[in-house]
Amino acid sequence: MKLVKPVAADRLSALLRQMPKAELHIHIEGSLEPELIFALAKRNAVQLPYASVDALRSAYAFTNLQSFLDIYYAGASVLITEQDFYDMAMAYFARAAEDNVIHAELFFDPQTHTARGVSMETVINGLHRACVDAQAELGVSASLILCFLRHLSEEEAFETLEQALPYRDKLIGIGLDSGEVGNPPEKFARVFARCRELGFHLVAHAGEEGPPAYVWTALDVLKVERIDHGVQSSKDALLMQRLAKDRIALTVCPLSNLKLCVFPDLASHNLRQLLEAGLAATVNSDDPAYFGGYLNENFTQTFAATQLNAGHAYTLARNSFEASFIGASAKKRHIDRLNAYFENFC
Ligand code: HPA
Ligand code: ZN
């Protein structure tokens, strides 16, 4: 482990903002800012149940995951054309580049769009074109993870997989999101087994609101490589040992957890506990347009609230590259860049 010299409190925020990092848990539909929702609604003549940007933003007072998902799926209804998906993703990449994100793995929810008559081709081609341009124009590498909606059936997930297969070279992995409680990972055992045979990387949301048992089955039944959120794991000592031993990354999203009332305040967040137990935790923004901050806000607010230090910053950034699905040489290049950044800063 690299020795990181202490950094004065007044320089820690700059260090966090400037350090190179990867984002591994961002729902691209959750990056739709109210202004862009209204602009796309106008472009596509979609009627919104909100009178203004301010009225929409003032509806962002969530009590749990489902109260957020209802508004999040309504916001996504303005996405119709390939250009809409492209514009949404490019707006995120531009914002991520400002936060010194140099690699991003984007979740998207095709069933939210195909259910409205938007084709899989439209969704994937728009997002993929943005990934290509993000590399060329912003120096941000990016890839796509298709998520199945867990409140729908496994049969519908199989149909979605079938629709996506013509574009499989534009996808790096498969994930599982939406309402967690009552929809355990094992509901999707067969479709994940098929995705595994097809060679996709696998991840799943587990232990956000749901119990540690869902993290166990995400690992042992779905055989995922990373757990999205996973913060409820700290309630199960044996699970904590397993996650640490197998270096299973958790893509933790502190501001999301705060806004969805998973923790009463940021000072109570268990990120420090996860790191100190030797887990490969990372910091991510989840749905930044809805939860009050992009990646650097997640870092700076959580560090301030829980008194994390420069050593934790290095570990979190390093974990983000180690846990990413990029090739070994890109991984080494990014970690060398991170090491050089810390040598110069500290
Ligand atoms: N959890 C589950 N589903 C989601 C989330 C989340 O945090 N964000 C968007 N879809
Ligand atoms: Zn999420």
Image: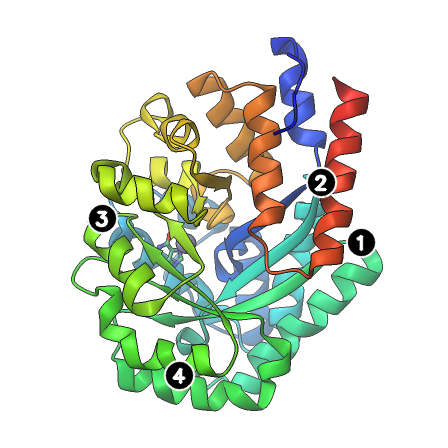
Where residue 22 sits in the image (x, y, percent)? 63, 47
Label 4: few (<14), some or many (≥20) within 10 Å?
Answer: few
Q: Amino acid at mark 4?
A: Arg
Residue at mark 1: 139
Q: Quadrant of the N terminus?
A: top right
The chosen color scheme is rainbow
Q: Is residue 77 above or below residue 53?
A: below
Per the rendering, the mark at residue 194 is 4
* Residue at figure coordinates x 38%, y 31% from the top left: 277
Q: Name the element at disc 4.
A: helix
Q: Between disc 1 and disc 2, whose residue precedes?
A: 2
Q: Nearer the viewer, residue 279 or 262?
A: 279
Q: Name the element at disc 1.
A: loop
Residue at mark 2: 100
Q: Amino acid at mark 2?
A: Asn
* Residue at figure coordinates x 61%, y 37% from the top left: 317
* Residue at figure coordinates x 60%, y 10% from the top left: 9
**Residue 93 sits in which quadrant?**
bottom right
Taking the image as drawn, is residue 210 in sight?
no
* Spatial CA span between label 2 and label 4: 36 Å
Position of 59 with respect to 86 (left or right) is left
* Residue at figure coordinates x 52%, y 84% from the top left: 120
Position of 101 with respect to 345 (left or right) is left
Per the rendering, the mark at residue 13 is none
Q: Nearer the viewer, residue 69 or 175?
A: 175
Residue at mark 3: 212
